[in-house]
């Protein structure tokens, strides 16, 4: 991030190895921006902080999951905020919520700077699906800033690694429908004149002097900018291109350079250069490539200590050899091609074992230090190794547990895509008989995987997961969540009668039975008994009810809401009023839950619109809103407001 030329410039790059980390390149760019801004421009910091607090209120701290350094702008202690944070974790599709908050952040930043804001992202051929959705939303929601030339977005990608169905290509096509102008610039190889200009600039010599050299370089590199740079470095090492102290300028030997054999493409050239490195340096480079294009130095230090191998010294040697850079607490490859070649230099089977070995080592450190961030990095390495790298069943159980813990941490930051991946990978490490020998961990893995799959739309996997839970769970309570999801899938597939049957049977097993056929007389009798119980209670006394703690009754309330939806779809208006009456009676007996306000809102709706008892209906609809505000969870506010 930086300021220059009358603009604020932010940059980030996607990484082939780190594709499992949603928003990684975008959040990294804005996180660096937060560091840059907080140390330079206090007036703008105060302006942005005030605008964020006004627009997003308490939700602004949720952005810390993506940009930890936003705390510098807000002037808050992130650790204390986390301890006192009581936000609701059960919101529907929390990743959409994060995208909305991020878009608001971009809008505020664009508005508060006098200069335009420029975001540049490199290697978009490796962009993850979550980042595509976020960028699409940023560009659409920031439409005013875009059109007023307050926000600009640039990207680079390799079109030979993409096609028209690539998510990035589809996004660029879709945003034009919103009137957002895009310009495509095709970058080809450089011509002889451009290469000469580049060589002239690098050597600080007049173009007429560098022309003989640049012509040879152009012939050998076909005008590839990175190839040119690497070749010139190699020529310097071989003393074919070097500074002369007597002539006070760079000189070269054209005949030797012309005869110097150079592979036809850059990958082969880099590979040949790597083979000339000491084996210890090459080994350290291959290790680094397993983590992506850049790695925190402290992570390498932990790995070095745990594995008892020399890494830092060897990587410093690679820095001296102009393969790596070192700065801002990181080792990084000077070009993504260098990382790619180092990574592919490892035999695929050996690479899987290396990923697994690095992950296990870092996992042991993360467990000792209780470091959640390091745990996620460790598990990502383990999963790149895969189940084939597991040596025995005990190790498989250990790795499955690590995936479970990493998935829970990802859920805390609303990253359900990564969480699902962790749970799914965790399941893949389980061996035959896991439902018998590791029941609790297996049940939790399957339940959380199903919960994430449901939210992110992995319905094929969801059906398999719920089927396994229903088949192997030891007791009915352990099957309830899966049954509830299965009923939802049935209703979505338009098999509403079957969904109603499943829900009715499940409620019966939970002790909340309805008659096989709910007649009008049954509903009226149920209404009478519910009214009698409510008559003795004021709104104030109802608001003072304790929260529901019985898990089976909480599950029954969730199933009743689903049953109400399905009865509505089926057109069964006779049975429909019995559902909110049942929800109210359960709440009066067992306490209030986040779904109780929906029951009261539906009850008020029924009294006013069906029975035309408007005053009483208004009372309970209004009460539902009051109860909603008092319940800590915000997961079902939309339903309460809808029925009220």
Image (cartoon, rainbow, N blue to C red):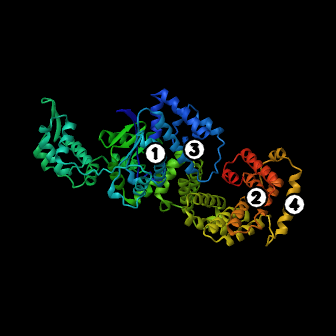
Alpha carbon of mark 1 to alpha carbon of mark 2: how far? 42 Å
Task: Please tell me which residue is depicted at 85% across the width and 47% down the height of the picture.
Answer: 538
**Residue 298, horizontal then vertical, whole percent:** 46, 39
When asked about the image quadrant of residue 237, the answer is: top left
The residue that mark 2 highlights is: 609
Distance between the Cα atoms at labels 2 and 4? Answer: 18 Å
Q: CA distance from mark 2 to mark 3?
A: 61 Å
Indicate the quadrant where residue 167 lies.
bottom left
Location of the N terminus by quadrant is top left
Question: Marks 4 and 3: CB-CB under 8 Å?
Answer: no
- Determine which residue is flagged by label 3: 368
Q: How many marks?
A: 4
Give the residue at mark 4: 528
Circle 1 crowding by C-alpha within 10 Å: few under 14, some 14–19, many from 20? some
The mark closer to the camera, 2 or 4, is: 2
The tag on residue 143 is 1
Q: Residue at x 36, y 42 (%)?
A: 315
Q: Of the residues under marks 2 and 4, which one precedes in the sequence?
A: 4
Q: Secondary structure at mark 3?
A: helix
């Amino acid at each position: 991030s930086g300021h220059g030329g009358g603009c604020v410039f932010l940059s980030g790059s996607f990484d082939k190895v780190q594709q499992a980390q949603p928003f990684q390149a975008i959040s990294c760019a804005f996180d660096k921006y937060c560091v840059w801004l907080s140390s330079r421009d206090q007036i703008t910091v105060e302006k942005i902080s005030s605008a964020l607090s006004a627009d997003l209120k308490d939700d602004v701290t949720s952005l810390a999951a993506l940009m930890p350094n936003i705390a510098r702008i807000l002037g808050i202690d992130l650790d204390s905020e986390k301890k006192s944070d009581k936000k609701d974790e059960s919101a529907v599709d929390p990743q959409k919520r994060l995208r909305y908050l991020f878009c608001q952040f971009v809008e505020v930043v664009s508005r508060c700077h006098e200069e335009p804001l420029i975001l540049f992202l490199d290697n978009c051929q490796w962009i993850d699906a979550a980042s595509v959705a976020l960028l699409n939303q940023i560009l659409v929601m920031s439409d005013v800033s875009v059109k007023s030339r307050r926000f600009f977005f640039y990207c680079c990608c390799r079109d030979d690694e993409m096609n028209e169905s690539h998510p990035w290509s589809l996004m660029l096509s879709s945003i034009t429908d919103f009137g957002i102008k895009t310009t495509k610039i095709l970058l080809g190889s450089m011509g002889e004149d451009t290469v000469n200009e580049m060589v002239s600039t690098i050597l600080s010599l007049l173009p007429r002097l560098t022309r003989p050299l640049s012509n040879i370089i152009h012939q050998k590199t076909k005008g590839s900018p990175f190839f040119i740079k690497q070749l010139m470095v190699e020529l310097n090492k071989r003393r074919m291109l070097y500074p002369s102290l007597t002539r006070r300028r760079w000189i070269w030997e054209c005949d030797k350079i012309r005869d110097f054999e150079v592979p036809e493409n850059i990958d082969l050239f880099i590979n040949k250069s790597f083979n000339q490195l000491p084996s210890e340096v090459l080994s350290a480079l291959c290790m680094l490539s397993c983590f992506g294009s850049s790695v925190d130095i402290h992570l390498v230090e932990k790995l070095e200590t745990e594995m008892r191998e020399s890494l830092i010294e060897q990587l410093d040697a690679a820095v001296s050899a102009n393969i790596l850079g070192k700065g801002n607490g990181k080792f990084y490859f000077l070009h993504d091609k260098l990382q790619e070649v180092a990574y592919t230099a490892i035999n695929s089977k050996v690479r899987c074992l290396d990923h697994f070995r690095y992950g296990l080592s870092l996992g042991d450190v993360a467990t000792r230090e209780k470091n959640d961030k390091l745990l996620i990095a460790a598990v990502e390495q383990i999963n790149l190794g895969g189940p084939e790298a597991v040596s025995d069943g005990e190790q498989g159980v250990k790795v499955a547990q690590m995936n479970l813990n990493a998935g829970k941490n990802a859920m805390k930051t609303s990253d359900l895509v990564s969480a699902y991946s962790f749970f799914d990978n965790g399941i893949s490490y389980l061996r035959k008989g896991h439902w018998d020998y590791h029941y609790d961990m297996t049940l939790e893995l399957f339940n959380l995987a199903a919960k994430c799959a449901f939210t992110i739309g992995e319905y094929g996997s969801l059906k398999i997961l719920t089927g396994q839970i229903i088949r192997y769970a030891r007791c009915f309570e352990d099957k309830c969540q899966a049954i509830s999801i299965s009923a939802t899938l049935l209703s979505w597939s338009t098999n509403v009668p079957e969904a109603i049957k499943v829900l009715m049977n499940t409620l019966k097993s939970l002790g909340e039975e309805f008659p096989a056929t709910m007649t009008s007389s049954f509903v009226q009798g149920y209404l009478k008994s519910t009214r009698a119980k409510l008559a003795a209670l004021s709104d104030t006394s109802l608001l003072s009810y304790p929260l529901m703690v019985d898990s089976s009754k909480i599950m029954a309330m969730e199933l009743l809401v689903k049953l109400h939806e399905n009865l509505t779809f089926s057109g069964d208006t006779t049975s429909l009023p019995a559902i909110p009456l049942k929800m109210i009676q359960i709440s009066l007996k067992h306490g209030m839950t986040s779904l109780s306000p929906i029951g009261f809102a539906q009850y008020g709706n029924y009294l006013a619109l069906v029975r035309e008892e408007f005053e009483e209906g208004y009372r309970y609809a209004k009460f539902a809103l009051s109860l909603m505000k008092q319940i800590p969870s915000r997961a079902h506010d939309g339903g309460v407001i809808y029925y009220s």
